[in-house]
Every structure is written in structure tokens, then in C-alpha cells.
């Protein structure tokens, strides 16, 4: 890079400030001022030179790859929308130029995630499916593909078949399922193939899953019982309505509700 004796606007402003400062302060203060301002000026010059160097490097990458700067930006920042052969040329040019940054992986395929939810036509599952879609959209720069499948809760064999198929074709599964032998066998199949499975909302005790995502169902039942107990003005019988008991989440909420309301608000009973 060439240097000249001509001062930049920033240098000129700094020199004028130093001259004005020297007219009104002691020699020691003037010395400190000169040192501080010259360090500041050097830092600014370094920033300018570094920025120019990076810009020149990106232009060289674009020239060697035969593409525009916008394409180079999309490839280096994994924004998508670039053909694989173009990605290869840009990354190859970046290596040749010696671009000082971590380059993306060239041959990484999109993550294929299967989401298996209940076809229950409730607000909860509709909102859950919508939230997953929005998250997948935000993660688009990571090239993630989310596939949603809705299965009737009364068809565990069908759900097990879809889990097993997902273990053959997907990189990971997120599953809402209840405890059924066929489902446990399908999860074992996924584990053997090294495909991670996350249980959602209701856990599958002892299942071959990576982890579970959901609330503390036992505590949720206890919270409901606490609120109900405070509204009871006299002892009586409480009718509890729940979903299918073959879901661990429902059983845990029932257990939490029954335990707290009978222990803290006796002689209330639960039906």
C-alpha cells in the first residue's frame, strides 16, 4: 500500500486540535495530548487500511470466481440461493487468495428434520406447528428443512411406521407420541441408525430418545390444584377432566393435581 505526505481530513483535524491545545496548556499536558491523539490517529489509519485490504480481497475472490461481490457475500455468509458449482468456485478462490476468515463447509447437505404432531384440531397443536415453521424460516441460513406430518392420536402403529421411515431418511425427528410398544420399537430403530429423536410435550419414559422438551407436568397439575383449592369455599367433590391416560403428560398432571388438593385442602376429594 502506498503512503503519501498529504494529510487525510481526519489527520488534518487532529493536527489542528494539537496546535490549538498547545497554545493553552502546559508542556506536560501537551506531551500527553500528542501521545494520546497520535495513538488514536494510528488506530483510525489501521482500521481504514484493514477495511481496504478486506475489500480488495473480496474483489479478488469475485474476480477469480467470475461472479459479483453480492454472490461472494451470499456464499461466505451462507445466505443460500447460489448454485453448488458457483459455491465451489467462490470457496476455491477464497482459499487461493488466503482470505482471513473461517470458510463455510462446501458439501454440507441441508438438515432434514421431521416433525410428527397430533392431528388434533386444537389451538395448541395449530400454534405449535406454526411456531415450528417460523423458527425453521429464521434458521434458513443454516439450510434447515422442516417437514411436518400430522397423525391421529388413535393410530400409534401409523405413527411408529413414520418414525421408522424417518430414521431411514431424516437427520433428526421431533415427536409427539404416547407410550405404545410399536412406538418404542421404532425409536430403538432410530437409535441404532444414529438418528436423534426429541420427544415433545409428553415424555416417553425409558425410550431411546436424545432428550425431552416440555414443561414440568407434575408441577402443572399441582399449580392447577392450588388455584382450584383457593376457590373452594367449602369441602366437596372436585371433578377433574383430562385427556388420554396413555400419555405420560396427562398422568403426571392428574397425579400432581390429586396429591396437592387432597393434602392441602382436605376433606376435598377428586373424581
Image (spheres, rainbow, N blue to C red):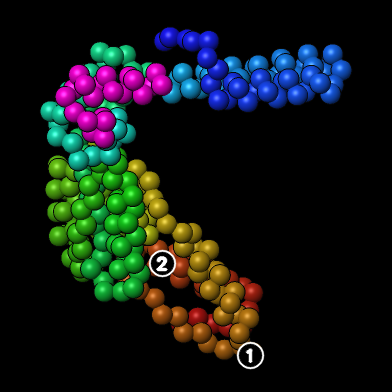
Q: Position of residue 222 (x, y in %)?
A: 55, 69
Residue 22: quadrant of the picture: top right
Residue at the far right: name it. 26
User: Which residue is located at x 53 percent, y 87 percent?
Assistant: 237
Disc number at residue 251? 2
Picture quarter containing residue 21?
Answer: top right
Residue ID at (25%, 13%)? 96
The magenta-colored residue range is 52-72
Quarter where residue 148 is shown: bottom left
Q: Nearer the viewer, residue 134 or 148?
A: 134
Residue visible at 49% across and 59% down?
216
Which structural element holds mark 2?
helix
Q: Nearer the viewer, residue 209 or 265?
A: 209
Task: Give the left or right position of residue 174, taking residue 26 as reference.
Answer: left
Q: Residue 37 at what x, y percent from top left?
A: 68, 20
- Mark 2 / mark 1, whichever is N-terminal: 1
Task: From the top left corner, tell me how far across and down residue 204 is, in percent.
Answer: 34, 54
Amino acid at each position: 500500500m502506498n503512503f503519501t505526505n498529504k494529510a487525510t481530513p481526519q489527520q488534518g483535524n487532529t493536527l489542528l486540535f494539537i496546535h490549538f491545545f498547545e497554545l493553552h496548556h502546559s508542556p506536560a499536558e501537551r506531551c500527553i495530548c500528542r501521545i494520546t491523539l497520535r495513538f488514536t490517529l494510528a488506530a483510525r489509519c489501521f482500521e481504514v487500511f484493514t477495511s481496504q485490504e478486506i475489500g480488495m480481497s473480496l474483489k479478488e475472490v469475485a474476480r477469480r470466481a467470475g461472479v459479483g461481490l453480492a454472490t461472494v457475500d451470499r456464499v461466505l455468509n451462507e445466505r443460500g440461493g447460489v448454485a453448488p458449482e458457483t459455491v465451489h468456485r467462490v470457496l476455491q478462490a477464497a482459499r487461493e487468495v488466503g482470505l482471513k476468515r473461517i470458510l463455510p463447509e462446501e458439501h454440507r447437505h441441508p438438515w432434514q428434520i421431521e416433525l410428527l404432531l397430533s392431528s388434533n384440531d386444537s389451538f395448541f397443536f395449530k400454534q405449535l406447528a406454526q411456531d415450528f415453521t417460523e423458527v425453521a424460516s429464521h434458521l434458513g441460513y443454516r439450510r434447515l428443512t422442516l417437514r411436518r406430518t400430522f397423525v391421529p392420536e388413535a393410530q400409534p402403529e401409523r405413527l411408529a411406521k413414520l418414525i421408522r421411515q424417518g430414521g431411514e431418511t431424516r437427520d433428526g425427528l421431533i415427536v409427539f407420541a404416547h407410550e405404545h410398544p410399536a412406538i418404542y420399537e421404532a425409536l430403538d430403530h432410530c437409535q441404532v441408525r444414529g438418528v436423534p429423536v426429541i420427544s415433545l410435550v409428553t415424555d416417553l419414559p425409558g425410550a431411546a430418545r436424545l432428550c425431552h422438551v416440555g414443561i414440568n407436568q407434575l408441577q402443572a397439575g399441582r399449580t392447577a390444584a392450588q388455584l382450584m383449592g383457593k376457590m373452594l369455599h367449602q369441602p366437596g367433590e372436585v371433578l377433574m377432566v383430562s385427556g388420554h391416560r396413555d400419555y405420560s403428560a396427562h398422568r403426571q398432571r392428574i397425579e400432581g393435581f390429586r396429591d396437592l388438593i387432597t393434602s392441602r385442602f382436605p376433606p376435598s376429594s377428586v373424581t
